[in-house]
Image: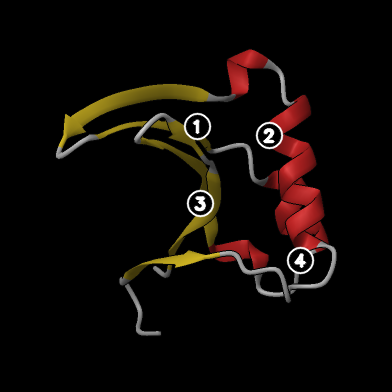
Amino acid sequence: MGKGENYIFSLKGNEGNLLDDVTRYFEKAPLEKIKYCSNYDKGHAKVEVRKCSVSQDSQWLILNTPNGLSIKSMARIESIPEINGKCSSAVRYIFFRSHS
């Protein structure tokens, strides 16, 4: 990664305990530490709700993660599609990394 560049990367299940730690963070973080938004999309017999939670409170992550110093914020994105009356759900976690 070059100096002055920004990156976005997703967290996968093979990252040791990091996925569990980030999941717990978004479940228990104080409301003032997280910004929320959602959007709804409807079309082609499908309704989808997307919920996004973003936090710049990454100090705990920086202290416990190798190379965590460059992580500036993290996001939890939940997608809830309903197709023909059946709902499912998927959650992704994304980190925003900056190198200056």
**Tag 4: Cα neighbours inside 10 Å, few (<14), some, or many (≥20)?**
few
Frontmost residue, 80 versus 6: 80
Amino acid under disc 1 = Ser
The image quarter containing residue 17 is bottom right
The image quarter containing residue 83 is top left
* Residue 90 place in picture, x, y as percent: 53, 48
Q: Earlier in the sequence, mark 1 or mark 4?
A: 1
Distance between mark 4 and mark 2 Cα atoms: 17 Å
Q: Which mark is residue 53?
A: 1
Query: At 62% across and 37% down in the image, what residue appears?
Result: 57
**Tag 3: Cα neighbours inside 10 Å, few (<14), some, or many (≥20)?**
some
| CB contact under 8 Å: marks 4 and 3 | no
| CB contact under 8 Å: marks 2 and 1 | yes
Amino acid under disc 2 = Phe
Q: Which residue is mark 3?
A: 72
Q: SS at mark 4?
A: loop
Amino acid under disc 3 = Lys
Q: Earlier in the sequence, mark 2 or mark 1?
A: 2
Q: SS at mark 3?
A: strand
Q: Is residue 3 above or below residue 77?
A: below
Distance between mark 1 and mark 3 Cα atoms: 14 Å
